[in-house]
Amino acid sequence: LHDVARSAGVSIATVSRALSQPDTVRKETRDRVLQVIQETGYRTNQVAVQLRTGTSRSLMVLVSDITNAFYAEFFKGIEDYARSRGYIILIGDTSEDPSSEQDYFDLLSSKKADGLLWNVDATPQVLATDSRTLPGTPLVLCNANDRIDAPTVRIDNDLGGRLAAEHLIGLGHRRVAQVCGPIAHDSIARRYAGFTSELAKSGCSVPDDLTFAGKLGIELGRDAAEQIARHPDPPTAVFAHNDVTAIGLLHTLLNRGLRVPDDISLVGYDDMPYAPAMTPDLTTVRLPRRRWGAAACKMLIDVIERNDVGQTEIIIAPELKVRGSSAPPRSMR
Amino acid sequence: LHDVARSAGVSIATVSRALSQPDTVRKETRDRVLQVIQETGYRTNQVAVQLRTGTSRSLMVLVSDITNAFYAEFFKGIEDYARSRGYIILIGDTSEDPSSEQDYFDLLSSKKADGLLWNVDATPQVLATDSRTLPGTPLVLCNANDRIDAPTVRIDNDLGGRLAAEHLIGLGHRRVAQVCGPIAHDSIARRYAGFTSELAKSGCSVPDDLTFAGKLGIELGRDAAEQIARHPDPPTAVFAHNDVTAIGLLHTLLNRGLRVPDDISLVGYDDMPYAPAMTPDLTTVRLPRRRWGAAACKMLIDVIERNDVGQTEIIIAPELKVRGSSAPPRSMR
DNA sequence: GTGAAAGCGCTAACAA
DNA sequence: TTGTTAGCGCTTTCAC
């Protein structure tokens, strides 16, 4: 900055102004300054700006497991929107590890980021031990969490569960299995509740021995499929709480000689990119992940910039994608 | 800091030292200071530290498309290793957009990050227009790129291609198709070169009308499959440059009534989590993505901290995972 | 319209 | 062992 000022024959204050408030500087002066900046390739030091102004134009995004391919589109939605408002994003993976969470929170209180977009599943342990750890920075949740009071942009998982149930009931299924994630996660609990309550409308319920719960993933799907294949009175349909799990189910069911959807129908959740390329292609509840990320990001930036946020909770509706893995049960054909 | 100093009855310098160089402070003083910090919940402002010391203990990771699920494990490898050395990572998606790249480079010259881990595919356009844009910060590439001179940690894609060819040749295939990504990408060019050169050893080559190139993805796989299915003299095996593309191929081949691997064998690349859950499960070239990320991250931190980096190029070997989608051609059975 | 100077919160050289 | 102080690079009053 000093060098630029010297070369342009002005003070550093003028250079600074030429950059941040161009109209407060006479045109000729401004042009001269910008000329020098062009020549020297000067770039302002963001850290100094940040220290001085207390603003970083960056957002922290925290997820519990970056390994989950599910987040890819979600990040993209955030990234694109953030960029359009002049922010960049910092993605962090807490691995649900308290010390890791603490590290990221420290960055926030250091004002390295202006706000936090938190896709929290389980209530983080930091909150249990020390309520002070949640920094007084703008925060938007991407999942409902009754332990934390903050604006939220979330998927309507209750609706998602109901869509799946409605579809299966509509096809004529009455004996149905469900493969759930950790019920302590709000998003999972709602899928579960939506699915079972919609079934209940038709007098159906999922028996305990057809309810499988665990960490969602291929392995859980495989395990559930094994038990279903061995079951004396097997279900005619299964609802899996995400597509990866559904893939595991599908693979093992086919291996065990069951035909999908002839013997058993399968409904997934998420609509991952590979869902339409399974054989049979997977009926699933589509989550508009990119839109979800963008909406959450918009709300966070609005909070940061104290714009009119309007509603404090946005609920995004999923959508059923009917494909080849679901059909009426054999008894109906 | 001032407040803590006042409460503890010492100077701010002592507080600073108690935190960063505990042994230069008398134990009693230190304890008193730490006590106060504990009570007040003081957290040091990283931005100020950064401005003063010129170090941020954070690393920038740049990829061209975060939407690619392939990166998930790669990020995790980086994250875990970075954390073990006390660094945090900032993930950015350039979308191969020059202005976006420029924004991220600015962060680097601002010293918001101590170094850059760059998984560059195509040579970025910033380099073409302005050679000054590449900041003088520590840089490690995660893909070879002859336009940029920097330490590199990369996958041995030549070997990957050769493993696929060797496998197919070994099974007895002689008429083989290949579905490639953009040949301008170094990683793709090497897969291609490795595959074709290994085939050449057995006097085989991939005819032009069985070579399909484009943006890797389900659609490319589908298109290739259509053409293969219609081909008057179809191949007995296909090598796809990644698993997503292989999934698209598999789906359409099966839809067109071809049996895999009975009529046609299929080999993918990457070993994505869903590869073993396809039907048939996918033979593929496994890339140890987590190890790759960790190795790259280690090299970058070593460069930053001026440790002995040793070699300046690390090449990570992929590994063939033989599964159900490949078998000898019908003529050999 | 422009310049001088204070200061964001911290670290490190130097002094005591 | 501890305190004083300069200054990292910038923005922003307040004078001129």
Image (cartoon, coloured by chain):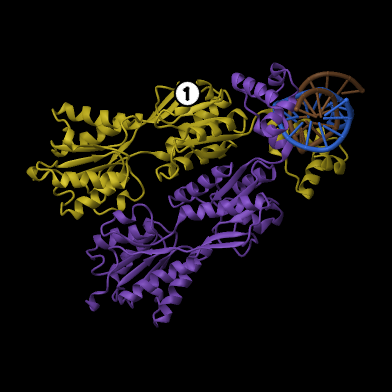
Chain colours: A yellow, B purple, C blue, D brown
- Left or right for B15, reference A105: right
- Tell me the crowding category of disc 1: few under 14, some 14 to 19, or many 20 or more residues within 10 angstroms, Cα based: few
Q: Position of residue B200 (x, y in %)?
A: 43, 80
Q: Position of residue B262 (x, y in %)?
A: 23, 69
State whether residue B98 appears in this view.
Answer: no
Residue B241, above or below A90: below
Q: How many discs appear?
A: 1
* Residue at figure coordinates x 19%, y 47% from the top left: A226
Q: Position of residue A244 (x, y in %)?
A: 32, 46
Residue A255, above or below A333: below
* Residue at figure coordinates x 69%, y 33% from the top left: B23
Q: Which residue, given by chain and number where applicable, does mark 1 sit on? A: A129
Instruction: Work out which quarter of the rendered image holds the N terminus of chain A and state it.
Output: top right
Give the residue type that dot 1 points to: Thr
- Left or right for B123, reference B220: right
- The kind of secondary structure element at disc 1 is helix
